């Protein structure tokens, strides 16, 4: 039995076509003679199916056959099948035999051939090919090398590796006294392990040494920077001395500002350091006093300028008298405000360039002469008055001579008068070479109009003879020209005393 719609061979008694779904009219196939014919035709139909499968994709119609199989489910094909039921039995016999020969060629490729011809079939052919390829020795070596590089890279980025390498490098630089590089390496290591007990002490020592180097070079800002980078990283027990060095860095920076008389900036800088925990309270107080001292300083500058005409006229006694009259005010200002820096003012157009007021060893001195910046450098006049001495002795001194880099160097002529109350007990002039403020070489002393000669070695007087010309056991230090007069001391302390200008060398 065949489907009247698509020609599909059907089983006896089927009510619907297994291929297209069309309803099958049962009465049409009642004649016994005709039922045997479809059985004989069945092999031919199968052959047709096979042949059509061998020629796939001839026409895009197989794609449409899928829609054809769905359409018979709709009610449209039903009337075509029902109409022969009402007609005489003989009418449907002829089409049933003829249609299977025509329709199978068009309809058969609908479902069965399609699964055999699929696009994904090339994939299984391509995928096994790379798997079958064997790796060459060069490729294997490349892979191994890549793995080694990857492992080495991972090892290098491990924190423990970086820490150990930084510590080793720091120790090497420290042995070479390269404190700058050593500090940088310790900072790297401590960034990985902050406050590490094993290296904190060494790291703090390196930071302190580097800070001292920079302070010595005048780079206080660089010194502070290296200390403040290291301070948060080392263990707390190693920070106190580092903080002292940081405070010293702030002092140096503030001193530069104070020298420029930029007091507000200096005070603000010191307060910044104090806020960080550095001990700068006294420095802030001193800077604030210096700021107040500016009004007083202007009066002192005006006083110094009054001495210039007297000194140009070589009226040294008159200049000393003027200084003596000002001492009370100078001492009061010093006790009130202090004087960490000398008061120096420009007096260009006079005999010398500048004149300065100094506080040295509890005494006030004045220097009028040539300067290199704030350093006494060249020929000048040094004055000291009412310095005090043994009991009621008072000393008034002036020295004319050469200076080099703020220290007496070269030939000096020192005039000294010592009073006991109002009585002049010593009036002498000492002439000779001075090295860094200390007597050194052959000297002449003029006393009471008579010259005496002797010598000093690094400030200590040389003994000429242990007895005087009368044979008395006195240590003679200086003789006059004919050795008829001499000078000596009656105490051992005087023979061991180091002689030098007041304010320079030990007295």
Image: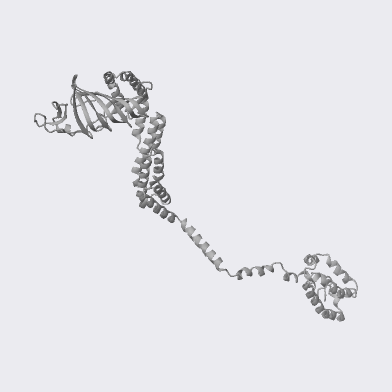
Q: Quadrant of residue 68 in the image?
A: bottom right
Q: Quadrant of residue 467 in the image?
A: top left
Which part of the image, by quadrant, shows the N terminus? Answer: bottom right
Report whether 49 appears left or right of 449.
right
Residue depicted at x 84% and y 81%: 36
Q: Quadrant of residue 63 in the image?
A: bottom right
From the viewer's side, name the closer residue of 169 and 60.
169
Residue depicted at x 41% and y 50%: 185
Type of colouring = one colour
Q: Is residue 12 in sight in this rendering?
A: no
Q: Where residue 108 appears, x then y in whole percent?
A: 79, 71
Q: Where residue 204 appears, x then y in whole percent?
A: 36, 47
Report whether 450 appears left or right of 345.
left
From the viewer's side, name the closer residue of 438 and 4.
438
Q: Where residue 51 appears, x then y in whole percent?
A: 79, 75
Looking at the image, which residue sits at the far front? 482
């Amino acid at each position: 039995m065949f489907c009247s719609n698509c020609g599909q061979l059907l089983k006896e008694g089927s009510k619907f076509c297994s291929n297209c779904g069309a309803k099958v009219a049962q009465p049409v196939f009642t004649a016994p003679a005709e039922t045997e014919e479809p059985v004989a035709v069945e092999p031919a139909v199968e052959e047709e199916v096979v042949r059509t499968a061998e020629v796939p994709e001839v026409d895009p119609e197989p794609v449409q056959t899928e829609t054809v199989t769905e359409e018979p489910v709709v009610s449209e094909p039903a009337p075509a099948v029902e109409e022969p039921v009402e007609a005489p039995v003989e009418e449907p016999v002829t089409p049933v035999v003829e249609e299977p020969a025509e329709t199978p060629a068009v309809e058969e490729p609908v479902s069965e051939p399609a699964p055999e011809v699929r696009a994904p079939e090339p994939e299984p052919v391509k995928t096994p090919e790379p798997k079958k390829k064997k790796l060459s020795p060069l490729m294997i070596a490349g892979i191994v090398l890549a793995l080694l590089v990857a492992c080495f890279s991972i090892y290098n980025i491990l924190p423990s590796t970086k820490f150990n390498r930084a510590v080793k490098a720091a120790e090497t630089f420290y042995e070479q006294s390269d404190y700058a590089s050593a500090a940088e390496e310790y900072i790297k290591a401590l960034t990985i392990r902050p406050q590490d007990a094993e290296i904190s002490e060494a790291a703090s020592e390196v930071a302190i040494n580097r800070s001292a180097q920079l302070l010595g070079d005048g780079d206080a800002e660089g010194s502070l920077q290296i200390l403040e980078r290291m301070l948060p990283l080392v263990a707390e027990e190693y920070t106190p001395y580092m903080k002292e060095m940081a405070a010293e860095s702030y002092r140096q920076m503030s001193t530069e500002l104070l020298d420029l008389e930029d007091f507000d900036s200096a005070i603000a800088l010191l307060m910044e350091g104090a806020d960080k925990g550095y001990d700068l309270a006294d420095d802030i107080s001193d800077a604030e006093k210096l700021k107040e001292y500016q009004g007083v300083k202007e009066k002192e500058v005006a006083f110094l300028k009054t001495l210039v005409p007297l000194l140009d006229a070589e009226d040294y006694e008159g200049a000393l008298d003027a200084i003596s009259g000002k001492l009370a005010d100078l001492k009061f200002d010093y006790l009130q405000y202090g004087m960490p820096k000398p008061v120096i003012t420009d007096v260009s157009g006079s005999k010398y360039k500048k004149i300065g007021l100094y506080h040295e060893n509890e005494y006030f001195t004045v220097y009028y002469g040539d300067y290199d910046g704030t350093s006494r450098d060249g020929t000048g006049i040094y004055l000291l008055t009412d310095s005090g001495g043994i009991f009621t002795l008072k000393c008034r001194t002036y020295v004319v001579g050469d200076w080099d880099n703020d220290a007496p160097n070269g030939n000096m002529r020192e005039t000294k008068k010592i009073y006991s109350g109002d009585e002049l007990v010593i009036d002498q002039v000492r002439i000779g070479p001075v090295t860094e403020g200390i007597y050194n070489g052959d000297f002449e002393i003029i006393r009471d109009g008579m010259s005496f000669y002797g010598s000093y070695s690094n400030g200590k007087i040389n003994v000429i003879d242990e007895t005087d010309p009368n044979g008395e056991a006195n240590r003679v230090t200086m003789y006059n020209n004919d050795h008829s007069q001499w000078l000596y001391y009656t105490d051992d302390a005087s023979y061991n005393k180091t002689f030098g200008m007041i304010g320079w060398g030990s007295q």
